[in-house]
Image (tube, rainbow, N blue to C red):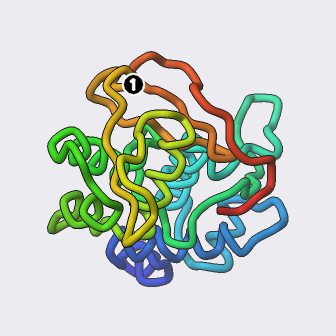
Amino acid sequence: MALKSNLYNDNIPAEKRRAIIWQFVRNNSDVFTASDIKKQLKISNDHSLPYLKKLVSAGYLKYANKTRRGRVVEFKFVKGPIYPPELKATGENLAQENMWRSMKMLGKFSAKELAVHSTTEKRDVTFHAARNYLYILEKAEYVHRVRGDFPEPIFTMNGTKNTGPLAPSIRSFKNVYDRNTKEYVWHGHQEGERI
């Protein structure tokens, strides 16, 4: 058994393993299987399948084909950021959770302030991630600009959209799903557009 684990990238840190899988997924325009990842990346199905299922739940991948028993055979990339998203088992984005909590505490904030206040020892929230999240939440009317673009926009939360403790989730094609009310509240980009 020890020999088998040395043949695969199963012994590297989970974060690095997810990054390797994400790069493969994002650069693959064709359908692929967990076996493709096993052959090309030397990562076992035990380590790749849970992450692939989270990516499906989050809308970054879709099931392209299933067997009669419902077992997943092939996956297809739908959309996603450059960097690998950190996801809970349910497919929810952990950086979005941090930003949602920070928005409630800050009251007024820029993307830069939001990124700084949302970053923890274990999770780095970039300016780019904060700016994109705010842009989409503005379209869905969760936040409003209280100051324009110069030197940078300042936002505040829309009190009527503070529907609960769970962060609005950006799903496939930049659709916004309110996890508190369990409904889609805004529909974004067209299928196949990469963000």
- Name the one closer to the observer, 156 or 72: 156
Which residue position is annotated with label 1?
A: 161
Give the crowd class for mark 1: few <14, some 14-19, many >=20 residues within 10 Å: few
Q: Is residue 186 above or below residue 38?
A: above
- The x, y position of residue 55, in whole percent, is 56, 50
- The residue lying at 41 percent from left, 47 percent from top is 145
Q: Nearer the viewer, residue 11 or 52?
A: 52
Instruction: State the residue at coordinates (82%, 30%).
Output: 68
The residue at the point 71 percent across, 42 percent down is: 72
As drawn, 5 above or below 156? below
Image spot of residue 112 (x, y percent): 30, 67
Q: Is residue 46 above or below residue 42?
A: above
Residue 66: x %, y % from top left: 79, 39
Decide which of 171, 61 is in the foreground and name it.
Answer: 171
Identity of the amino acid at label 1? Lys
Residue 43 vs residue 86, the one in the foreground: 86
Locate residue 36: give its quadrant.
bottom right
Residue at 52%, 76% (x, y): give it. Answer: 20
Q: Quadrant of residue 42?
A: bottom right
For label 1, the SS is helix
Q: Quadrant of the C terminus?
A: bottom right
Q: In what quadrant of the picture does the N terminus appear?
A: bottom left
- Residue at the farthest top position: 181
Total of numbered circles in the picture?
Answer: 1
- Horizontal and vertical percent for residue 120? 17, 63
